[in-house]
């Protein structure tokens, strides 16, 4: 049946909604539990929500409703452990409708995909109060009364809730808008170009309605930026300039006048138009109506929101400093200690991490020099010259002349080769598919992984930088194994398919997730994936060296007062890149303190657990079983993973 009766009024309804959102200030635009009339979380399987349907007689568009959070979460009192873990996490999930949409979970809770997250300060404070109460309720459970499997869940979920509450002290310490992937503008742009499901006419309607809320949400981000400024928390001036450039490119900004931008030329519009062609229950008239509605919301909501944010970043640039580290912030040292704990799930101090990094840098560089000698490179040649030879001798893919096709094909071949060898190293393996996606917003062949939807509607995806550039082949195998198989896709897709509590399929413990992906790079050597590729093996070590350098540089910036230029100089020397090929890495560490340390710390913890198992089990050690143990609990804090490995060793030793 054609959805045209609903679509006929969509343009009008979205217009009224956009006007209501843009005319209200940040506080007026925010929606809290007191405003909501939706059912509570008590019985998510049977809940429903009123869809913001547009009709031909619509004179106003009701704001999409936010699921109500039960007052005091009283309905969780008296639940058993399993039920509490599941239902309390659902309470938290319902605070983020965008996450529900991206994970394919909205329908599970009887919801539409028509709502953006509430980012207002009032909503954030309400969420913090809920998190504190959930932690208090969680602590009533007696860990010793649980079986071993539930003790793992207890430890992981308890760490997660405790970390949320620890973070309340630093709720304003982050930079909301910056140049990297966790920035508000990057997340929003990716949400509409990649994360939003567009399979049905209802999805398309939800897309337009969600797009109409961008201006309201951006007003809330503006509120957050001003609150942070009042507390002395402003991103460095160079970060603000990079973010302004990124946002300007997203809206093709060439002047200060938002009306000068043609919405039809924006990537959000072109992606929406392309994906509408694949929706079977739309006819041509429906598509025209939806495209007109999307064009309107880009013009009235998205573009003005981006221009307003750019103007605010420009203003903040007049008061910002160039100091890179969070030591400059109020309570900055305590904030950095918290972030290191959060990102590594260990209690290592900045000094310990710094010294560990220096040791690892020295070890890896020596190993790489041994590889140079085996390849017959001149013995007196500098480390930097050796790396230049590696890149040249490995060959290049030129996306400037060949386009992204050969790059995608090469990555697909590498992933197929890895997939063919996993059986000897894993008992568990995911069934979900993995696609390689050409990401035209950056080049160089690197990339990132985005997980598939839990409902199976979207596969996992490795997004590789395919903009015109020269891509050296030496690093490509390791990038494929890190992002895909047996790295991120293998681990994350498997966690989504195992019979685990929902939080273990969604929560991202950085030290574990990135530690596993870096361990997967190392494991590829044992799988024989570099046997006929000595340049790729050096590329692997080069990327491991980068992760060791991160330990030194991140702590140097945020704990030891290094300037941005001092950090870049160290990286250039340590990486053998006098031309500054890794300069952008330093700016990443500036805005995501501690995050980059999780890779190497996590890898070392997994290797340490494996070494204990090999030593204590001897000939009884089985690599397939070890990997299954590491992967079977989904993402967990590293301390919890260590206990899981030790429990297995004790059980296997008999």
Image: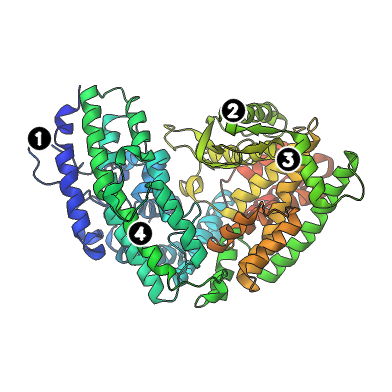
Q: Mark 1 against mark 4, which lies toward the viewer? A: 4
In front here: 287 or 155? 287
Q: What residue did someone put label 3 on?
A: 523
Verify CB contact (< 8 Å) between mark 1 and mark 4. Answer: no
Q: Mark 3 against mark 1, which lies toward the viewer? A: 1
Label 1 and label 4: CA atoms lie apart by: 35 Å
Q: Earlier in the sequence, mark 4 or mark 2?
A: 4
Is residue 512 shown to the viewer in this render?
Answer: yes
In front here: 210 or 259? 259
Expressed as whole percent of the image width and height from the top left, the position of residue 259 reads 26, 49
Label 3 and label 4: CA atoms lie apart by: 44 Å
In front here: 1 or 649? 1
Q: Earlier in the sequence, mark 3 or mark 4?
A: 4
Q: What residue did someone put label 2 on?
A: 402
What element does badge 1 sit on? Answer: loop
Give the answer, above or below, for where 530 lies relative to 128: above
Label 3 and label 2: CA atoms lie apart by: 32 Å
Label 4 and label 2: CA atoms lie apart by: 37 Å
Label 2 and label 1: CA atoms lie apart by: 50 Å
Label 3 and label 1: CA atoms lie apart by: 60 Å
Verify CB contact (< 8 Å) between mark 3 and mark 4. Answer: no
What element does badge 4 sit on? Answer: helix
Left or right: 177 in relation to 556: left
Q: Mark 3 against mark 4, which lies toward the viewer? A: 4
Q: What residue did someone put label 4 on?
A: 309
Callout 1: 10 Å neighbours few (<14), some, many (20+)? some
Q: Earlier in the sequence, mark 3 or mark 2?
A: 2
Is residue 133 shown to the viewer in this render?
Answer: no
Callout 4: 10 Å neighbours few (<14), some, many (20+)? many
Q: Earlier in the sequence, mark 1 or mark 4?
A: 1
Q: Residue at x 28, y 34 (%)?
A: 204
């Amino acid at each position: 049946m054609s959805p045209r009766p609903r679509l006929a009024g969509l343009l009008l309804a979205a217009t009224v909604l956009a006007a209501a959102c843009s005319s209200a200030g940040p506080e007026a635009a925010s929606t809290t539990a007191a405003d909501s009339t939706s059912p509570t979380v008590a019985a998510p399987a049977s809940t429903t929500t009123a869809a913001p349907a547009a009709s031909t007689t619509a004179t106003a568009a009701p704001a999409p409703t936010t699921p109500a959070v039960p007052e005091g979460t009283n309905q969780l009192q008296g639940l058993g452990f399993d039920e509490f873990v599941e239902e309390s996490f659902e309470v938290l999930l319902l605070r983020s409708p965008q996450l529900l949409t991206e994970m394919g979970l909205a329908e599970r809770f009887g919801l539409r995909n028509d709502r953006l997250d509430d980012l207002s300060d009032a909503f954030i404070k309400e969420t913090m109060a809920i998190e504190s109460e959930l932690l208090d309720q969680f602590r009533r459970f007696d860990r010793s009364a649980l079986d071993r499997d539930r003790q793992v869940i207890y430890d992981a979920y308890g760490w997660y809730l405790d970390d949320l509450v620890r973070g309340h002290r630093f709720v304003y310490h982050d930079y909301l808008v910056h140049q990297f992937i966790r920035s508000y503008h990057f997340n929003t742009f990716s949400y509409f170009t990649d994360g939003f499901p567009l399979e049905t006419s209802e999805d398309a309607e939800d897309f337009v309605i969600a797009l109409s809320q961008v201006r309201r949400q951006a007003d809330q981000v503006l509120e957050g930026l001003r609150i942070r400024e009042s507390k002395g928390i402003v991103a460095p001036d160079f970060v603000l300039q990079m973010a302004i450039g990124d946002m300007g490119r997203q809206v093709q900004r060439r002047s200060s006048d938002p009306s000068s931008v043609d919405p039809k030329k924006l990537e959000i519009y072109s992606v929406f138009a392309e994906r509408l062609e694949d929706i079977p229950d739309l006819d041509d008239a429906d598509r025209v109506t939806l495209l007109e509605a999307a064009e309107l919301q880009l013009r009235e909501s998205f573009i003005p929101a981006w221009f307003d944010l750019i103007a605010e970043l420009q203003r903040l640039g007049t008061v910002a400093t160039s100091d890179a580290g969070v030591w400059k912030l109020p309570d900055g040292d305590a904030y950095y200690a918290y972030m290191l704990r959060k990102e590594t799930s260990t209690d290592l101090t900045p000094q310990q991490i710094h010294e560990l990094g220096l040791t690892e840098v020295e070890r890896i560089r020596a190993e790489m020099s041994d590889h140079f000698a085996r390849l017959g490179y001149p013995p007196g040649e500098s480390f930097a010259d050796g790396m230049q030879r590696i890149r040249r001798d490995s060959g290049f893919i030129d996306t400037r002349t060949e386009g992204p096709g050969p790059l995608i094909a090469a990555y697909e071949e590498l992933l197929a080769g890895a997939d063919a060898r996993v059986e000897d190293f894993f008992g568990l393996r995911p069934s979900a598919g993995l696609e390689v996606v050409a990401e035209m917003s950056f080049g160089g062949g690197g990339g990132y992984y985005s997980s598939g939807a839990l409902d199976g509607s979207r596969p996992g995806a490795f997004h590789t930088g395919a903009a015109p550039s020269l891509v050296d082949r030496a690093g490509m195998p390791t990038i494929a194994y890190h992002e895909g198989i047996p790295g991120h896709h293998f681990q994350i897709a498997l966690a989504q398919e195992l019979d685990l509590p929902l939080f273990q399929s969604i929560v991202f413990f950085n030290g574990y997730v990135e530690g596993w992906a870096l361990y997967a790079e190392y494991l590829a050597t044992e799988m024989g994936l570099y046997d006929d590729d000595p340049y790729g093996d050096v590329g692997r070590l080069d990327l491991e060296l980068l992760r060791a350098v991160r330990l030194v540089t991140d702590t140097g910036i945020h704990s030891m007062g290094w300037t941005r230029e001092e950090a870049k100089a160290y990286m250039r020397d340590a990486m053998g890149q006098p031309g500054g090929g890794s300069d952008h890495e330093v700016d990443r560490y500036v805005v995501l303190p501690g995050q980059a340390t999780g890779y190497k710390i996590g890898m070392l913890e997994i290797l340490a657990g494996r070494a204990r198992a090999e030593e204590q089990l001897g000939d009884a050690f089985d690599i397939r079983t070890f990997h299954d143990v590491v992967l079977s609990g989904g993402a967990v804090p590293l301390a919890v993973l260590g206990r899981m490995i030790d429990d297995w060793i004790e059980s296997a030793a008999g």
